[in-house]
Amino acid sequence: MSAAVDRAPALALEHAALVIDGRVIVDHVDLRFAPGTLTALVGPNGAGKSSLLSLAAGDRRPSEGLVSVGGRALPEWRVRELARERAVMPQDHSVRFGFGVREVVAMGRLPHDSDPARDDDIVEASLATADLLALTERNVQTLSGGEAARTAFARVLAQDTPVVLLDEPTAALDLHHQERLLQHARRLADDGACVLAVLHDLNLASAYSDRIVMLCEGRVVADGTPREVLQRETIERVYRQPVLVIEHPTRGVPLVLTDMPREIAAGTPMPPR
């Protein structure tokens, strides 16, 4: 069962495909994402998650099909206009020049008409949310991976758009900052934004998303609420890893635990490699 919401989509992919060097990376996907929702894109390595997000962002053009934001096809948007509609946190957080952290976060305000007082307030709030107030004057090229990721997220917050696209936003973060980032992503959705996040951690997806879209080999293999998608049989088939799915003791959501291969659990020796 789909968890799509019966509202005009903030973001839609219609029969969208991406083919690179003859290889199908995204295979004719039809997805609609509503305002006020947080959707997690999950799946094994090479499933097409980041490629799908790049289509949604307009960083890649679909080989077939259509991607639209706010009801308009991406090619109809001017660059600055689109930057006021959707913000993107990429996997690569590196900055090629020696800007300070505050300067990088302030770049999120560039698509908007200048309002110095409001811009300063938004930048300051974004720095605080990303736990960066102690690092505002640091050269971004000296940051750790986690600090760089938080800076990239703060820039997205400062951009203040109705559509927010996050590509593996928690990959470089410690446990505290993973939870903090996704708590704020959840807050953005609760305040009306359409948030789409590529996540590898199924338990973070379960805890914070309204909807999970699971991909495998460029196709959607499951789409629904966390409880609908995070079924043991589905996870084992897609990830080729034995798991247990239990109830989280305090969050009341599915909790996914890796399990031993069943032949080991049964005492049968593993075959030689």
Image (cartoon, rainbow, N blue to C red):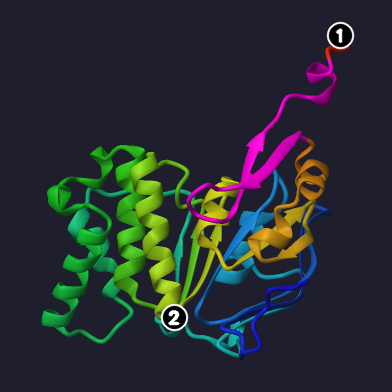
**Secondary-structure class at tag 1:** loop
106 is within the stretch colored magenta = no
Q: Is residue 271 left or right of residue 257?
A: right
Residue under the point 33% across and 68% down: 157
Residue under the point 43% across and 76% down: 190
Residue under the point 28% across and 49% down: 97
User: Residue 47: percent from the left, percent from the top?
Assistant: 73, 50
Location of the C terminus by quadrant is: top right
Q: Is residue 94 visible?
A: no
Residue wearing tag 2: 162
Residue wearing tag 1: 272
User: Residue 30: percent from the left, percent from the top?
Assistant: 76, 74
247 is within the stretch colored magenta = yes
Which residues, given as a range, are shown in magenta? Answer: 241-266
Q: Are marks 2 and 1 in contact (CB under 8 Å)?
A: no
Q: Is residue 230 visible?
A: yes
In primary-sequence order, the first of circles 2 and 1 is 2
Q: Is residue 27 left or right of residue 47?
A: right
User: Residue 59: percent from the left, percent from the top?
Assistant: 56, 66
| Residue 267, image quadrant | top right
Name the kind of residue labelled 1 in the image.
Pro
Name the kind of residue labelled 2 in the image.
Pro
Exactly how many numbered labels are in the figure? 2
Q: Compared to 270, does 184 lie above or below? A: below
**Secondary-structure class at tag 2:** loop
Counting other residues with Cα less than 10 Å from the Cα at mark 2, is it few (<14), some (14-19), or many (20 or more)? Answer: many
Q: Compared to 205, does 159 lie above or below? A: below
